[in-house]
Image: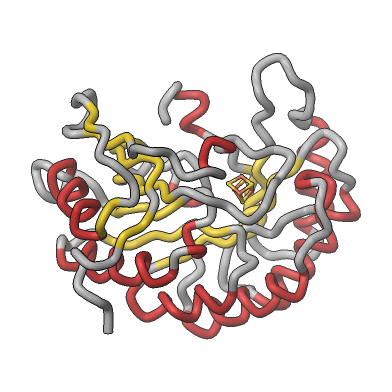
Amino acid sequence: MSAAPDTIRVPVLEIFSSFQGEGPRVGERQVFVRLAKCDLRCAFCDTPESYPTPDTARVQVAAPHGREERPENPLSVQQILDAVRRLDEPPGLHAAVSITGGEPLLHPQAVHALAVGIRHLSLRVHVETGGHRPGAVRHVLDVVDEVSPDLKLESATGAPTPWAAHEETFQILEAAGKAAAVKAVVGADTPPEEVAEAAVFAAEHLPSAPFVIQPMTPPAGKAGRPTLYHLYHLHDAAGRVHPDVRIIPQMHVYLGAR
Ligand code: SF4
């Protein structure tokens, strides 16, 4: 059972309406609740501003171009739910609320309470995670609709792949049938052998979910994006060992959306 939504507080970076830009739900209109803080430091990270807790959150007031409010952090879960309800106007405009970060599962109690409230708004609850916090996945599992865990490749993140945490996370999601996809970000230096190993691992521990290879989006002026030729090689390697492999770039970047 969740505590009352006005008693739980959590640091928030931003709340806004946009299109889902990653994975198999790409193009779907969603409200994004981006929680602050992350315990990883992926080399390709596109949201390093999420690492500290900002003094205030950026909260869009109405979709698509509403003014922003800047409430002080941390916000109560009730404040977040009020912002979501205000953005989803007319009700049902959005298909889901994506709880993202940073690493949202650093705040499992808040995610649990948020998910309960979001479901009361008749919106689907989608959680994005680095896939390395299985205990927190277990904590929120009953009240969320789907989770998109990453599979962190060392060649792209610059840190060892947390295989044991991924394995436990994937097994929990497979048993519950709640994985939207496994996402592996790849760069120009990601070898096909590493992607093949990851695809074998995903096929073994989370066979019900598509394996999404996401080309990294480096900061402007920096190298790192894999060529199309390289992506064919990576897909070939993964496709031999996994039944559902997809190449999906970050669509919101192409749209110029958040
Ligand atoms: S898990 Fe996400 S927010 Fe955290 S460092 Fe990696 S890419 Fe950035």
Question: In the displayed structure, would residue 167 be above or below residue 95?
Answer: below
Question: In the displayed structure, would residue 48 be above or below residue 257?
Answer: below
Task: Name which quarter of the figure residue 16 lies in.
Answer: top left
The image quadrant where one finds the C terminus is top left
At x 51%, y 24%, the residue is: 254
**Residue 131 visible from this viewpoint:** yes
Give coordinates of residue 54: x percent, y percent.
43, 39
At x 38%, y 72%, the residue is: 109
Task: Name which quarter of the figure residue 174 lies in.
Answer: bottom right
At x 75%, y 20%, the residue is: 222
Q: On the picture, is 56 further left or further right than 233? A: left
The image quadrant where one finds the N terminus is bottom left
Give coordinates of residue 189: x percent, y percent.
87, 37
118 or 51: nearer the eye? 51
Question: In the displayed structure, would residue 176 be above or below residue 248?
Answer: below
Give coordinates of residue 69: x percent, y percent.
22, 32
Give coordinates of residue 235: x percent, y percent.
76, 48
Question: In the displayed structure, would residue 192 be above or below residue 43?
Answer: below
Number of marks present in the image shown? 0
**Residue 228 visible from this viewpoint:** no
